Structures are given as C-alpha cells and as structure tokens.
Amino acid sequence: MVIDLDGPPALVNLYYVSSLVDHIAKRHDFGWVDSYTAGKILADDVRFLAPTRSIPPARLPRTCRPPLSHTPPQSYLFRHIAPFDWHVRGARMAPIPRLAWDDPAALELMQRRQPVVLTGTRLAGCAQQKWDLDYLRAHVDPAAMFSVYSSPNGQFMYSNVNKNEPGFAFTPTVYHEELRFTTFVERLAQAEKAAESPRVYLQQPLYQGIGDRITDDFKTVPWEWVNAVQLALGFGPLTTNLLLIGQPGTVTPCHYDEQHNLLAVCRGEKKCTLFSPDQFECLYPYPVGHPADRQSQVNFDEPDDRRFPRFAEARGEVCTVAAGDVLYIPPCWWHMVENVAQDGLNTAITFWFKCGPGDAPAKKDRGSGVLVSVRRNLEKMAAQELGPRAAIQFWKATMAANGQELEESSFRDYHVALVERVQLLLPKPEDAAVFLEGLVAGRFHPSLCEKVSTTSQ
Ligand code: OGA
Ligand code: ZN
C-alpha cells in the first residue's frame, strides 16, 4: 500500500483510517469490509504494516544536568519496595510486561485494556533521532509559544484553576506560562545552575504552528501502524500529541486520564507506577469539581495514613520506559511518572485517543475504567441537581455519616434517592449503599471543603 504523507498529522488521520479499511479489504480479498470486522482482522495487519526503517540510537543531550542536591527523593513506593523485592512481598507491586511491538501477546493485553511496554515500535523515531534542544531551538518557529510549567519541588501536579465551580480553596504549587522556546532553554540553564531555581517542564501539544520542519519530522511517525492499532483495538479518534521535555528527577504525581495513551519515550527514561481503575478507593481522587480533578490526594512521599488509610493496601504495577519504548496506559488507569535519567533531558510524546467502540465494558469487569466513569457521572449529576456547592456539602455529610443515616433531612432524602438509582446500575442492588460509601470515603475531608459553603450559591 502506498500512502502519501501530506497534510498535518492530525488531518491525515482520518484519511488513513479509510485507506486502511481499503487495504484490509484487498489483503483479505473482501470487496468491502465494515470497520468492526476491520478492527478484528487488523490484529494481524498491525504487524504486516509496521515500518521497517532502522533508526540509530538516540544521542542524548549532555546539557541541563541538575545539581545532585536538588534531585527529589525517590517516591515512597520505590523507597519501600525495591525491584528485587517484588516476589518476596507478593503481589503488592508487579512488573508491567515488556514485549516486542509485534508480539501477539502485546496486542492481546491492549485488547484487554491492560498496560504493556512495547519495544521497538519506532513510534517517536523522529524525536529520538533528531529532537535535542539545539535542533528544536534551531527549527521551531521563533514566534511560537510553548506551554511550560515551573515547580519549586520538582512535582508537577496538573490542575485547572478555571474549573472550580464549588469554590474549593486551592493554590496550585505549579506555575504555568506560555514561553518562546529560547526562553524555555534559558530557564533550563537557570535551573541547572541554581538548586533553588524552580524545575521546569515543557508540555506542548504538537500542532502545525510549531514550525514546518518539526511538522515534517512528525509526518515520519509510522501513521499506518498508529492507525492500524487504533482500528484493531477499537480506540476512538487521536486527540493530542503532547511533547514532554522534563528535567531529571521531576515527577508527575499519580493521576488518571480518561483516554488511551501510547506514551513514547524518545530520550532519557521514565519510571512509571500504574494502578488499575479498581484501586479507586485506595487512591482518593480529588472531587470531580475540584481544580485537581483526576489527581490522587495522597502524597506518595509522605502518605497520611489517618486520612488515607486504604493507600497502604494499594496494589500497583511498575515499569521503566526507556528511549524507544512505548508504554500503553489504558483509560482511567492511574499513573505516576518519574523522569529518572540522570544524564540529559527526558523527552516523550503522548498519543492520546478517545475511548471508542472497543471500550464497551465486559460485564462485571471491575478492573475496567467503566466504574470510574459511573462514579464521575454520579458526582456530576449531584452537582447539577443540588448545585455545585450543596453537592460538595452533601458528599461531605455522606462521608461523615460513614454508612449511618445522614443527619440533615434534605440530604437524607437525596441519599435515599441516589441509592435507589445506583441499585439500577449494579449487578447486586444490595451493594449500592456500600458503593456510595466507597465513592466518598476519605475524599471529602472537612479541610478540603472548608471554603465551600452553600450560602453564596
Ligand atoms: C501521560 C502523563 C506525564 C509525564 O502521558 O499521561 O501523565 O511526566 N505523562 O510523562
Ligand atoms: Zn497522564
């Protein structure tokens, strides 16, 4: 099949999908093939279509080493659970399988929405080969603005202060700016020189305005393979390619995204700790209306056992994703990402896809992200029905009641109505009250909700 790669990557995507379906129809001698059948057949075609160009090993930039004293401590989990300890300690932290991109077992794991490290995909080969700081500085559009975050302690928790309808008191520790690339490079140099300077992390969606040369490089991504995977696994459309350039020692704390992610590491190395969506009750996400929605409230370096008692029960999976590897993170899987390479920068590109036809839930699959979506929707529904502020007070009262009857009568009535609705959703209706308890436990602590009152609704 000959595919002509013109047009920006985000636009060629749709074209590929249709040309792939054609290709499969021909390859399998069908006159016509619907996308569902194409998805099934494509498990084989993914291998057939993979690129074969070889790519020389990455040249790691030697600049921007942080002073050793500034490297943040290793996270709680890694301090306490050394890799060689995994088997001794049983199932607490398991390794994520690491498989060649064309190993059928890898595709099967992804089909089951399980994480896997794929080796040898060449997914971000362009960035691996070329995109060091000097190259990017020389070839990005000098007028283009880049999204850069600064953090005094190297922890880069994502938040959105514009999203705070209930009025939570929240001051982000991460500062966001739009900078020219040259200014970002200057900030990196400052951070390298002075331990007290904030760490910086570039997190910029790739789009055509970044520069023609960069766009041309990005067209060399093996889009046939990307689209074959997308179709084979029933992902929805590709939404974003985020370019991540982070300093050694920086950490993205534990959170979940609602999309599929093929996280392609181009330079450096990332240590990733994942937790299945069924670990929800051990990881205490912020409320849905909070600016830090989807982030865990637990500080992994100093977990507060009294406030988050079930964190100690969390069962996770770990892997190291090296340059050239791709980590598949399924939707609603928690992940903490540590940039561990000590030598040079850590560069990666995300390939985020919406959920699609392959995400219809297997019945009673508690490991899937579906129950996370159900919980999110219940929080959104209460915000709509009670108002955002009263809904937070309702959840706080539900948490305080700890399975007993709620004191305030209007909240009590709403709780009864909510239990009845949840009963419709669960295979065992008698589990509904416990499900609601698990939804709120530890998440609506009075200190988090203190600025949220119902008076100025
Ligand atoms: C992600 C993500 C953070 C990082 O790819 O979804 O959270 O630091 N990445 O790489
Ligand atoms: Zn993420």
Image: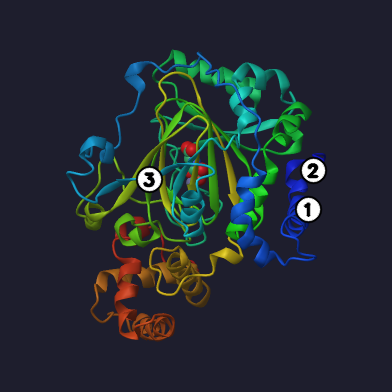
Residue at the spot 26% in from the left edge and 69% down from the top edge: 400
Ranked by sequence position, the earlier of labels 2 and 1 is: 2
At label 1, counting other C-alpha atoms closer than 10 Å, the crowd grade (few under 14, some 14-19, many 20 or more) is: some
Q: Quadrant of residue 356?
A: bottom right
Residue that mark 1 sits on:
19
Q: Seen from this angle, which residue lies furthest left? A: 88
Q: Position of residue 178 (x, y in %)?
A: 63, 33
- Colour scheme of the picture: rainbow
Residue that mark 3 sits on:
96
Ranked by sequence position, the earlier of labels 1 and 3 is: 1
Q: Mark 2 touching mark 1, by CB under 8 A? A: yes
Residue at the spot 27% in from the left edge and 54% down from the top edge: 314
Kind of residue sitting beneath label 1: Ser
Relative to residue 142, is residue 227 depicted above or below? below
Q: CA distance from mark 3 to mark 2?
A: 34 Å
In the image, taking residue 164 as reference, residue 285 lies left or right, namely left
> How many numbered marks are there?
3
Q: Position of residue 68 (x, y in %)?
A: 34, 17
Nearer to me, 23 or 246: 23
Kind of residue sitting beneath label 2: Ile
Residue that mark 2 sits on:
3
Ranked by sequence position, the earlier of labels 3 and 2 is: 2
Q: Is residue 260 visible?
A: yes
Kind of residue sitting beneath label 3: Ile
At label 2, counting other C-alpha atoms closer than 10 Å, the crowd grade (few under 14, some 14-19, many 20 or more) is: few
Q: Position of residue 375 (x, y in %)?
A: 43, 69
Q: Which mark is residue 153?
A: none
Q: Position of residue 275 (x, y in %)?
A: 36, 52
In the image, taking residue 172 as reference, residue 283 lies left or right, namely left
Residue at the spot 46% in from the left edge and 57% down from the top edge: 332
